[in-house]
Image (spheres, helix red, strand yellow):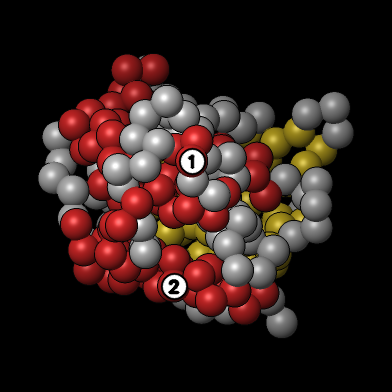
Amino acid sequence: MPLLRVDTVSHAFDYPLFENVSFTLEPKESMAILGVSGSGKSTLLHVCSTLLKPNRGEVVLCDHNIYHDNDDARLKLRRYDVGIIFQSHYLFKGFLANENVELASVISDRSIDKGILERLGIATFMNYRVGDLSGGQQQRVSIARVLAKKPKIIFADEPTGNLDDKTAQEVMNVLFEYVEKENAALLLVTHNQQLAKQCTYVRHLHLDGLKEES
């Protein structure tokens, strides 16, 4: 059974962004979405992850037709089954890095995998305040916070945008390993062609839908 099924989804604001987007993601699969700036990649990610109801179409996430569900059902999905990595970190700046990660663990009632902190290269500064960390360090803490929930599906919007190439690859390795180990799935928005090619599928977003990379 797919973890994510998107069926003929369309969305527009003051102008049309995309129409008739359809795809599925099974456990242990990943998909990278590429496209020019303003094509609606982040919007599509928000639609798929419960944050934005599309103008048309259906999204079935973890066997829930999410925009037919009520707000409480979507909130429960976000709390336990969905992990969202935003371009902005959205960390609690007055807290320690460790407290940010622990908060996600407590809310979702899941234990923290200390090995993930090691593989993300952040174990040594988990007792630092977020405001004392670099942008790249904060990004990795935000990724650790998402993985601490042990989500069934991860939605990642430019998760390596603040990282150098070597660290970006190390972070993506952690995400791919998580997807494989936990029978999870990953939907990735990125401009990095090299990272995109490591996903199960690579698609380009156009006005008339997702197109397979040639």
> Which residue is pictured at 28% across the width and 64% down the height?
118
Could you tell me how many numbered marks the image carries?
Answer: 2
Left or right position of 77 against 47: left
Residue of label 2: 170
Q: Nearer the viewer, residue 174 or 6?
A: 174
Q: Quadrant of residue 56?
A: top right
Residue 9, image x, y percentages: 61, 42
Q: Nearer the viewer, residue 158 or 12?
A: 158
Q: What element carries label 1?
A: helix
Binning the other alpha carbons within 10 Å of mark 2 as few (below 14), some (14 to 19) or many (20 upward) gives some
Q: Earlier in the sequence, mark 1 or mark 2?
A: 1
> Which residue is pictured at 32% across the width and 17% down the height?
72
Left or right position of 107 against 5: left
> Which residue is pictured at 62% across the width and 78% down the height?
194
Quarter of the figure with the C terminus:
bottom right
Which of discs 1 and 2 lies nearer the camera? The answer is: 1
Residue 96, image x, y percentages: 34, 35
Residue of label 1: 132
Left or right position of 213 against 208: left
Residue 7, image x, y percentages: 53, 47
